[in-house]
Amino acid sequence: AGAGARSRSRASDPLSEALERLCDGLLSKRQARETFRKMDKDLSGSLDGRELKIALKRLHLALDDQHLAAVIAHLDADGDGGVQIHEFVSLVWERKLVLLRRRFAAAAHTAGGVDLPKLFKHYDRDNSGALEYEEFRQAVRKTGGASFTQSHVPDQELREMFDHVDKDQNGTIGLSEF
């Protein structure tokens, strides 16, 4: 993966450790696709166990066959025995959303605990009770830190994040979705 791939993880089990290392340093879907193509040595469009094992070894993580099979099973959404590019990008995407939720929670932390309603209201500039895309974009850019800059997460991907978070698909993000 990226330059940060050698950072030490806090993951406690081999599956979490492997997923974290595979995603570490990948800040956009473009980077995820590029990394996948580098790991796909036989250019099949699918990562098999051998290719995944080599990639993880390069990330300083050697897994036994049982743990490697668990990683593949976790990533292999369609059950065909390999990891396709869309499955890998999906992993990176989900990790990115988890990071964003953590950043919002950290930004909403007060002496009394986490106050997400207060943070939500701060970015709800028109006091509509919901975040429109532009308000969400500003919240992510200001709160997300270096991992969510325009160069790391283009507006097109940010729009996809917005649509993903907008569970009821009404074009806004309510506090419960936030």
Image: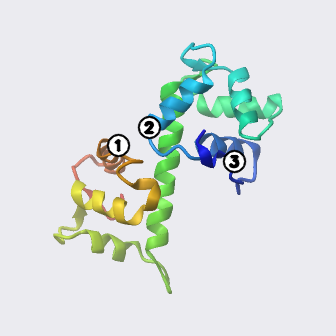
**Amino acid of disc 3:** Arg
Residue sitting nearer the eye, 105 or 47:
47
Q: Is residue 98 left or right of residue 132?
A: right
Q: Quadrant of residue 28?
A: top left
Q: Quadrant of residue 35?
A: top right
Is 6 situated above or below 45?
Answer: below
Three-letter code, disc 1: Glu
Point out which mark residue 6 bears: 3
Residue annotated with mark 1? 157
Q: Secondary structure at mark 1?
A: helix
Asked if residue 109 can be seen in this view, the reply is yes
Relative image position of residue 154 (x, y in whole percent): 34, 45
| Residue 19, horizontal then vertical, whole percent | 64, 42
Earlier-in-chain disc, 2 versus 1? 2
Q: What scheme was used to colour the molecule?
A: rainbow
Q: Is residue 30 above or below residue 49?
A: below
- Which of the two discs, 3 and 2, sits closer to the camera? 3
At mark 3, the secondary structure is helix
Question: Percent position (x, y) of residue 103?
Answer: 47, 64
- For this rendering, which residue is in front, 150 or 169? 150
